[in-house]
Image (cartoon, coloured by chain):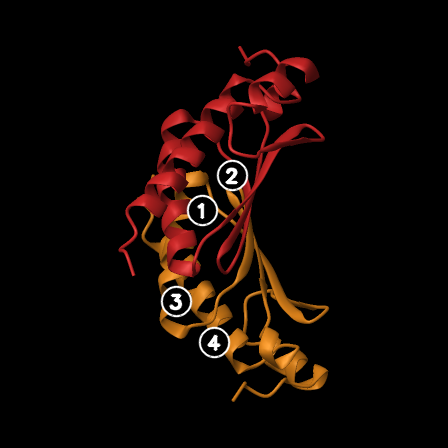
Chain colours: A orange, B red
Amino acid sequence: MSAPKLSAEAIQSKLKELNNWRHEGDALTQRFQFSNFVEAFGWMTSAALVAESMDHHPDWKNVYNRVDVALSTHDSGGVTEKDFKLAHAMDALARSRVLSAPKG
Amino acid sequence: MSAPKLSAEAIQSKLKELNNWRHEGDALTQRFQFSNFVEAFGWMTSAALVAESMDHHPDWKNVYNRVDVALSTHDSGGVTEKDFKLAHAMDALARSRVLSAPKG
């Protein structure tokens, strides 16, 4: 059974818990920027492992240090709890990459 | 110094050595399809290591088992030998993934 599609109001409310994600069309979208390609692809690799373990995969585009992400639950025709769960995980992975960077 | 941009004629000639790549706009483009997300992202990881070692990075978009790639040399304003080199490497990596898949 596919997860229930969230209402626009529910999405707006839950967006406040995320770090600057947007609701565009049928998806949650975000642009992640890193210091270079290695950092960007390293983050993608971490996020890919999480996505595969959730069996819920992002649409994403990478150009050098930038990753544009769109999360949507295609079976449900919109945004569901699964998208928010993956978005939270992506935010956490981005934070941990920044915090673990060498100082100086 | 950036690599010299290739002429449309040179690009058409060199495209024959690749596996169904196209010349669109200022880029070489290709759609790679795999059996699932793990295969697609595994291929991307291999290609990312090659790209980083060449210091020449793809623009690419992944949706589940599909990876759309565009290769262009931004400093040169078009397609150069570096793009063909990366395209050949990507083809070789895609071939090796297929050949090494377990037989069913």
The image's mark for residue A52 is: 3
Label disc, if present, on residue A40 of the rendered structure: 1
The reply to whether callout 4 and callout 3 are in contact (CB within 8 Å) is no
Mark sitting earlier along the chain (3/2): 3
Horizontally, residue A66 falls left or right of residue A43, namely right
Q: Which numbered disc covers residue A85?
A: 4
Q: Position of residue B40 (x, y in %)?
A: 43, 53
Determine whether label 1 and label 3 are within 8 Å by CB. Answer: no
Q: Residue at x 62, y 77 (%)?
A: A79
Q: Could you give the CA–CA distance between mark 4 and mark 3, rounded to whole angstroms?
A: 13 Å
Q: Are marks 4 and 1 in contact (CB under 8 Å)?
A: no
Q: Which residue is mark 2?
A: A64
Q: Amino acid at mark 1?
A: Ala
Assess whether mark 2 and mark 3 are in contact (beta carbons under 8 angstroms): no
Residue A98 shows in this picture: no
Residue B85 position within the rendered picture, expressed as x and y whole percent measured from the top left:
46, 23
Q: CA distance from mark 4 to mark 2?
A: 26 Å
Instruction: Assess disc 3: are there few (<14), some (14-19) or many (≥20) residues with their C-alpha within 10 Å of its C-alpha.
Output: some
Is A27 in front, or is B39? B39
Residue at (61% x, 22% y) in the render: B79
Q: Earlier in the sequence, mark 4 or mark 3?
A: 3
The residue shown at (61%, 26%) is B74
Please give the chain letter of the residue carrying mark 1: A
Give the spatial CA distance, label 4 vs label 1: 20 Å
Kind of residue sitting beneath label 4: Lys
Mark 1 or mark 2: whose residue is earlier in sequence: 1
Q: Amino acid at mark 2?
A: Tyr
Q: In this view of the protein, which residue sits in the foreground, A104 or A75?
A: A75
Dot 3: chain letter = A
